[in-house]
Amino acid sequence: MVNVLFFVLAGLAIACAVSCVYHKNPLYSAISLIGVLLSLACIYLTLAAPFIAIVQILVYAGAIMVLVVFVIMLLNLDEDKPLTRLRYLYPIGGALGVVLLAQTLFVFYAVTKAPHQASEQGNVIGQTMSIGTAMYTEYLLPVEIVGVLLLMAIVGAMIMSRRMREPNLELVEGSKEDGE
Amino acid sequence: MMNIFLAELADPNVSIPLVLPEMLLALTGILVMIYDSIRPGRRRVTGTISMVGLILSAVALFWIWSTPGQQLSAFGGMIVADSLRMSFTAVFLLVSALTILVSTVWVEREDVHAGEYHTLLLFATVGMMFMASGNDLVIIFLGLETLSIATYVMAGLRRRDLRSNESALKYFILGSYASGFLLYGMALVYGATGTTNVTQIALNTETAQFPALLLVGAAMLVIGFGFKVATVPFHIWTPDVYEGAPSPVTGFMAAGPKAAGFASFLRVFVLGFPLVVGVQASEFLHDSWITALTVMAILTMTVGNIAAIVQNNVKRMLAYSSIAHAGYAMVGFVGAGVAKTATGRDDAIAAVAFYMLTYAVTNLGAFAIVTLVARKNDRRTEFEDYNGIGFRSPVLAFSLSLFMLSLLGLPLTAGFIGKVLVFRPALEAGTSLMVILVVIAVINTAISAYYYLRLIVVMFFRERTEEWSQPKISTALAAVLAITIIGVFYFGIFGNNVIEMFSKYPVDVQMR
């Protein structure tokens, strides 16, 4: 049952990935990418990692994809025209793809060679509850520091994105054309 | 299901006193933020609250430092109270206090929203303090991110200036990239040793799962930290970022985050990857990082000094000078790594902390004057702008000359004692590599005389063609100049007192 589910989801992920690269319209690509991320999240669920699955949906399929779609809409991108200037990137991309494929095959090889360990029953590591308990006991201080970090990031973003008081003022470029 | 977890709840091992300095400062930051949102635009009040917070935090720090019988670690070993933390934290607090004083002039001149600036500065300081006090890779990374994000924004505070925007964007993109390296390195080290606690990492190198993984992780940590402390070949961002950022922020970036980077860098490498005689993985790792850092130190000093010679902009010159100084500090760092006894190692760590203190004091003094001379929008920062101001603004010119001489390392100034102390541990190790390192460091000091003295020559012996209106020295700036000048002489003549204090607590990890 799980095997069938895996192949269905993996096939969906690959199909979405291909469509993400294939489509010329950036918005279609973005939507295909959401498909990839969702099918990956489902695969995580079948691997008994519900927390990572939810985080995958919240962070990648949610927040980051919203950002991507916003950028596409704000920049008002046209259909992607093939750039002759960047032709030389094709062989580089191909070479990197071969390296990646070799790496994947090596991992497969290493995993099949390694002695099999049956997963312990009742292993709670990686589940939402154990992460929650660890965060509020063992890792209490880091969680507090993250609170400060996020607060400060919000303040920083506000400073950077606020409208300037005199929006028509020219930007100061270079140095010293005039004094004070 | 519920009961299993309740039974296994780990003790968070909270100790409020041990994180009191950090907590007080974070609370001050939040207080400044809230006050600023209720009554915006009161620069003096937010500045005063920040100063009070820094002073309270310093009091808490000295209380931990001087009370015997304090516990040495808390939060499951994530936070430690050792000499490394204490000495570096003292440097950070001093840097922030001086930066707030220096920026009073700039904040008023440029009409910066001061409340937010002070909040960012305080949170950046909290980040730096966690970088020094964290004995766990998690804390160190979070401290570093807190610091970095605050400094990215601070570099871009002059939003109307294209150079400031460029500075912030370059720093943000390259800095995030370096943080990625750092995080990946930490993950690999965790994978190899099974722990993020620095003390435990040192114990686990013997039984490291995959020595190669540990080595790659350590290499990535070198890249990440090397970027933060601006060492060659990870220094490319420094001149542009330092030139574009507002002058007081540049002074802060050169003094504070650099020292914080060194604090974590020292802790992770000297205490986390020590030499364990007889364990092959550990010996190899130790050998590799000592050699790598020695080469980096030589490159950093040489490239920094030679590039500084050809600069025509004072801020760029000081940026390259800060690269060179990171190189000198690394000599002490390597010295701490090769020290044969635990005392020798602690002395070397204290020497690096002292070096960062002397550099911070001198550098912030110099940047106070650069801020004052630069005028609105940071325009007058070329060497020409300093032509012949020597006898028209004698106070500024003589103080700047003093700071240049201290950066050069003239006897009786802070820079001299600092250099002697960081070179000594490397010399004591006695291996030929270390001797070569110190010889190159001394040659570099001689090279650096050219550009430091050039500024003095420009100020006193060049004719001024443009008009010079003497800038007004405000009370806050006078205080900064007084503190830094007294500091330069005090550390130069009575440096021993400070060094003794800096090596008072034993470092928690035993030498094996």
Image: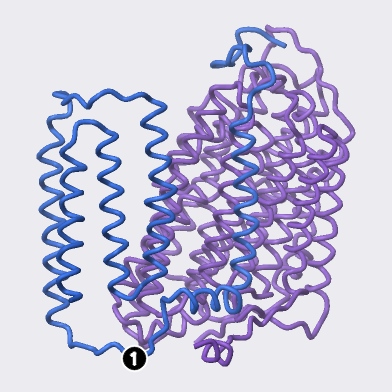
Residue B48: quarter of image: top right
User: In the rendered image, which quarter is residue B27 located in?
Assistant: bottom right
Task: Where is residue A35? Give x, y as percent.
Answer: 27, 50
Q: Secondary structure at mark 1?
A: loop
Identity of the residue drawn at 69% across and 10% down = A179
Q: Position of residue B481 (x, y in %)?
A: 81, 38
* Visual hue assigned to chain A: blue
Q: Residue furthest front?
A: A1
Could you tell me which residue is drawn at 36 percent across and 31 percent down? A72
Label 1 Cα neighbours within 10 Å, binned few <14 / some 14-19 / many ≥20? few
Which is nearer the eye, A63 or A117?
Answer: A63
- Report the chain holding disc 1: A
Horizontally, is B479 left or right of B254 in the view? right
Q: Is residue B232 visible?
A: no
Name the side, left or right, on which B267 lies relative to A85: right
Give the camera-side residue of A156 and B449.
A156
The image's colour scheme reads by chain
Numbered marks: total: 1
Q: Nearer the viewer, residue B229 or A155?
A: A155
State the image quarter where residue B77 is shown: bottom right
Apparent side of residue B347 relative to residue B48 in the rendered image (left or right): left
Q: Is residue B168 above or below residue B502?
A: above
Q: Name the residue that disc number 1 marks.
A: A121
Q: In percent of the image, x 50 and y 71: which residue is there?
A: B270
Looking at the picture, which amino acid does disc 1 mark? Gln
Residue B72 vertical position relative to residue B293 in the rendered view, above or below? below
Q: Residue at x 51, y 62 (%)?
A: B265
Q: Is residue B218 visible?
A: yes
Between residues B491 and B378, which one lies in front from this camera angle? B378
Chain letter for the part of the structure drawn in purple: B
- Residue B144 placement (x, y as % from top left): 56, 56
Q: Position of residue A59 (x, y in %)?
A: 43, 54
